[in-house]
Amino acid sequence: MLAALFSVDPFGDRSRQGSAAAFLVLLAFVISFLTIRTSARLSRSVSWWPGSVRSGEVHIHHLVWGICLMMLSGFLAFAATPGTAFAHLTAVGFGVGAGFTMDEFALWVHLEDVYWEDEGRRSIDATVIAVAFAALVVVGTTPFGLDDPGTVTGTVVVVVGVLALALLCFMKGRILLGVLGLFVPVFALVGAFRLAQPNSPWARRRYSPDRLARARVRFSEHRRLARWRHRAIDALTGAPNRDDAT
């Protein structure tokens, strides 16, 4: 299987070539994310370990290098022949850049260094969602569950229905279920009927005070499942510490 994925025949099956490139992007993404996160943790606890580049008041985070690498790899990909070693190299470069960038996703939305703060957990959530989406693409899952599209009318109805359910998941703060639901509609259906996150647009606009209070209890960080989830994330990526930053 791996031999088929990494075939360098430029005139081979384009679908197989695309799967090989997507697999390389995903693999490079996961490895680079874990590597840069480990490096950040070491720079936090080991005095001689190199951290972010600083020059006076300028603080260059690793997402900058990631963005530059994605731009370079994306540009070179246009010049690469699909299925060749050079094309695979650009896929790896893009995946590494994406891993560096997604590791600091929280900085995109907060526009400040919240890497080791509670808000920095957004980077972990975004990475999990990105990996889930990419993995579904790599394994060849058909979007909207349309393994056999059938008629045009039926296809339109299915696509609109799945998009509506996924959008409802997003409005409820159930992002992962919404993304998975774009490929496996049952996830979107489950998310659409589950209780919304208390800080989501759906909960703020449509929930009564009683239901909103129920949502806050359901997603409280003091619940046992939430505590175990946070401990697992802390063990993998490092615990928040407002007095420290990368």
Image (spheres, rainbow, N blue to C red):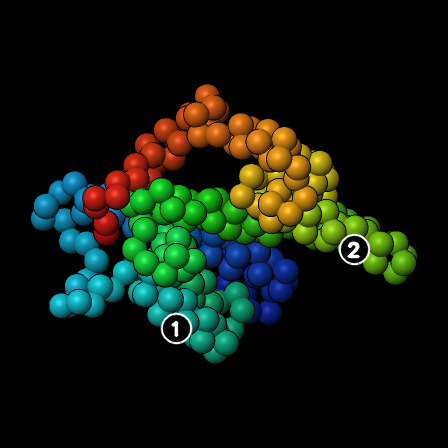
Specify few, some or many for label 2: CA neighbours under 10 Å numbering under 14, 14-19, or 20 or more.
Answer: few
Task: Tell me the residue at 62%/42% (across/down).
Answer: 203
Which x, y percent locates residue 172? 62, 44
Indicate left or right for 181 with 110 as reference.
right
Which x, y percent locates residue 108? 40, 60
Closer to the N terminus: mark 1 or mark 2?
1
Query: Which disc, if any, is residue 141?
Result: none
Image height of 4 relative to 124, above or below: below
- Judging from the image, what secondary structure is the residue with disc 1 in? helix
Q: Quadrant of residue 190?
A: top right
Q: Which residue is mark 2?
A: 160
Label 1, label 2: how far apart the Cα atoms are: 36 Å
Which x, y percent locates residue 186? 72, 39
Question: Which is in the foreground here, disc 1 or disc 2?
Answer: 2
Task: Tell me the residue at 38%/35% (across/down).
Answer: 233
Residue 99 visible? The answer is no
Please state which of residues 97 and 106 is positioned toward the viewer in this rendering: 106
Please state which of residues 65 and 14 is positioned toward the viewer in this rendering: 65
Image height of 47 relative to 159, above or below: above
Image height of 155 relative to 55, above or below: above
Specify few, some or many for label 1: CA neighbours under 10 Å numbering under 14, 14-19, or 20 or more.
Answer: some
Q: Which residue is mark 1?
A: 72
User: In the image as oriented, which residue stretches furthest toward the front?
Assistant: 209
Residue 59 visible? The answer is yes
- Amino acid, disc 2: Val
- Judging from the image, what secondary structure is the residue with disc 2 in? helix
Task: Tell me the residue at 72%/47% (across/down).
Answer: 165
